Structure formats: C-alpha cells, structure tokens
Image (cartoon, grey):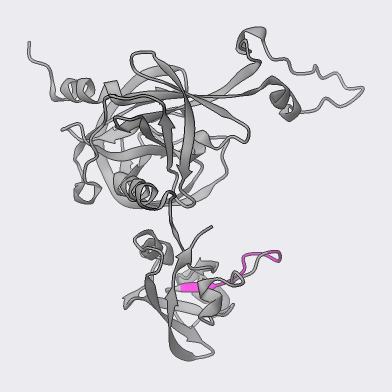
C-alpha cells in the first residue's frame, strides 16, 4: 500500500527534528519557588528526587527545534532558550544527546539559533515563505507539552501576515507578534520551535504561538525571518536588527475621536507611560528631530495603517537603510529622513 503524502513528508523531516530540554541548578530552582508565609498552613514546595539528576540539575521545561545545517546548527524559538541560568540539552531523533550553546537570539522576533557539537546530521531544507497560499496543506512537527516527542499535526494555511498580541507560552509575557502564518493544525506548548513544513518537506515557518481558549488557531513565524538571522550570524557573527528608537500608538478612528486627532491613520509618537521616553535618547529618531506628539502618517511614500505599521517596515529593513517619514506636527506636514542604527 503506497504511503500518503503526509507520511512521506514526516519520514523526510522527522530525522532532523529535535527535542530541547531545559534544566537549572537545584539551588537556583529552590530560590525561585514561592516563599511560605511564617505561621501559615502552607506546605513548603518540594522537588521530587527523581527530577534531580546526578549533577544536581532539575528539568524545568522543554521545547522543539530542527537542524538546518549538518554541523549541528539548530533553529528554535527564542522563548524556549531564554531561561536565566538555564542549560540546554538537545535530544536527536535517534536519542543521542548533546549540550547546546545559544549562538544568537533575535532581539525582535521569537527566533534563536543553537549549536551542538556534531557532524553529518540530517537537515530540514528551508523553503520560501513569500509564496505561501491560503488553503495550502501543511504539517507541524514538535515535542508536544515538552513530553510527547515526534508529535505531528496537519492542516492548512488559514491566514497570512497576521498580527497578534500573545504569549508564546503561558509563562511568557504578552508581546506583539507580526507577519505570522495562521494555521489550523493543532499546536501545544512544547511544539514551540518545531518546523512548519509544506508538502515537499521544506520548512516554511517555525511553530510559535497559540491562542488559549480558541480551537484550531495557531501561528508560526515565516522562515524568511530565520533565514535573515542565519545570514546575519554567518556574515557578521551576530543578528543585526535595525533600530528606529521611538514608541508609538497606532492611530485609528477610535483614537482620532478620543484625542481629536487630525487623521484616522498613522502612528502617534507617545511615551505609553510616565517612566518611558517617547524618543529613545541618541537614537536615529532622536537625531532626526522626531518629537513626542508627532503623527507619522507615511513611510517611504506608503500610508501607515493598522495593517501596515512602522514595525512592518522595520521587519524588512536593514541596518543603515533610510526611512523617509511623513509627519504631521502642529498642523503642518514635514518630511524627515532617518538612517536606521543597529539595535543593541
């Protein structure tokens, strides 16, 4: 009986999918445990002996990743390998285990690059996320819940260029995530960092987030962002992301009415709070003379909207690029050119 297309994809990709185990020193884990109030009826939390290895390390979580270079370079999510003081162990599909070093973390997107000391490894071929189509068949592979290795789900691409505010997993803070691929394949915590592949077994995304309480609503980062990071790491020895250096609120009809603004679109430069500057001192925006209260209505000749924000332009820009911004200030329209610096 001939195998199905999905089975063929799984057999092609699975050897290059890895599990990532996150561990910390026992004494560090104990320090982070909730303190028991003296005199209360609470019982001090305990760590079972079977969770502590011979080195005194405690497993505290897990995630997924996939090998993209035969010498042991692995892609995963940044939030999977962001534990302060954590150690990371990669388990290959053949059960070999290797300690992993974090080569780079993307300062904006939820992407990290790891390295293990191995050679001749199977790899996942990187595809083209710019040609994804709605309704396209996909397969997601990962390490569900950090427990169930080699978990596979399939579905279709149900949305493109999505923008959401979500936590990559329940323990992470909410953040803005843009340019995402929406899929209806089941993704669970622990699947994070695994590959989203097309029916030729090429990675078109990295499983990144789910919407808790929703059904069949998951998201992946487009693989083009990871390719950019891999290129930066090879060329510059680090990931280089551009910095503009301002904070803003997206303008819509509701904000226009509430604040009596002259336009219903654009980006209102604003501090978002008493402890944060609207313009980062010394940043490109500061040097270009952008001010708190300015409304940026266009970038490089294209109108800024809820669907096309400044962050979308930055996502496709490089350090040293020039953004030409059209600004409304005190009833007048001005234009400024901003040369992007490197985000530190």
Camera sees residue 183:
yes
Q: Relative to 343, is 203 above or below? A: above
Residue occupying image coordinates x 38% and y 34%:
215
**Seen from this angle, which residue lies furthest right?**
39
**Seen from this angle, which residue lies furthest top?**
50
Q: In the image, residue 200 lies at what x, y percent?
A: 15, 33
Foreground: 263 or 22? 22
- The magenta region covers 267-275
Q: Relative to 319, is 95 above or below? A: above
Residue occupying image coordinates x 54% and y 73%:
269
Q: In the image, residue 138 lies at what x, y percent?
A: 23, 34
Answer whether residue 335 is magenta in the image.
Answer: no
Q: In which quarter of the image is residue 216?
A: top left
Residue occupying image coordinates x 22% and y 41%:
127
**Left-right relation of 222 to 48:** left
Quadrant position of the C terminus in the picture: bottom right
Residue occupying image coordinates x 54% and y 46%:
174
Camera sees residue 185:
no
Q: In the image, residue 205 lies at what x, y percent?
A: 31, 40
Quadrant position of the N terminus in the picture: top left
**Left-right relation of 218 to 70:** right
Q: Relative to 282, is 58 above or below? A: above
Q: In the image, residue 82 lies at what x, y percent?
A: 55, 38
Answer whether residue 268 is magenta in the image.
Answer: yes
Foreground: 269 or 122? 122
Q: In which quarter of the image is residue 23?
A: top right
């Amino acid at each position: 009986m001939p195998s199905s297309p999905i089975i063929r994809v799984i057999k092609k990709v699975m050897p290059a999918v890895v599990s990532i185990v996150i561990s910390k020193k026992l004494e560090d884990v104990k320090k982070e445990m909730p303190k028991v109030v003296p005199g209360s009826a609470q019982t001090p939390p305990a760590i079972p002996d079977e969770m502590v290895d011979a080195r005194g390390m405690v497993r505290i979580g897990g995630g997924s990743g996939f090998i993209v270079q035969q010498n042991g370079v692995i892609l995963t999510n940044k939030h999977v390998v962001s534990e302060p003081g954590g150690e990371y162990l990669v388990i290959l599909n053949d059960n070999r285990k290797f300690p992993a070093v974090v080569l780079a973390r993307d300062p904006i997107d939820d992407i990290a690059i790891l390295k293990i000391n191995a050679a001749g490894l199977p790899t996942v071929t990187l595809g083209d996320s710019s040609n994804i189509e709605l309704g396209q068949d996909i397969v997601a592979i990962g390490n569900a819940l950090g427990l169930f290795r080699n978990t596979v789900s399939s579905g279709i691409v149900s949305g493109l260029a999505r923008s959401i505010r979500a936590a990559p997993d329940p323990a992470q803070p909410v953040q803005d995530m843009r340019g995402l691929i929406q899929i209806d394949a089941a993704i669970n915590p622990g699947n994070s960092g695994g590959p989203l592949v097309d029916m030729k077994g090429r990675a078109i995304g990295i499983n990144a987030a789910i919407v808790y309480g929703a059904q069949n609503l998951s998201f992946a980062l487009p693989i083009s962002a990871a390719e950019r990071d891999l290129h930066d790491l090879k060329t510059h020895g680090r990931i280089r992301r551009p910095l503009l250096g301002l904070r803003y609120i997206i303008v819509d009809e509701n904000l226009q009415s509430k604040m009596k603004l002259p336009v219903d679109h654009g980006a209102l430069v604003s501090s978002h709070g008493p402890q944060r500057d609207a313009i980062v001192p010394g940043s490109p925006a500061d040097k270009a003379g952008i001010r708190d209260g300015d409304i940026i209505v266009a970038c490089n000749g294209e109108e800024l909207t809820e669907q096309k924000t400044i962050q979308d332009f930055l996502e496709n820009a490089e350090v040293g690029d020039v953004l030409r911004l059209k600004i409304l200030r005190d009833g007048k329209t001005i234009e400024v050119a901003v040369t992007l610096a490197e985000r530190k």
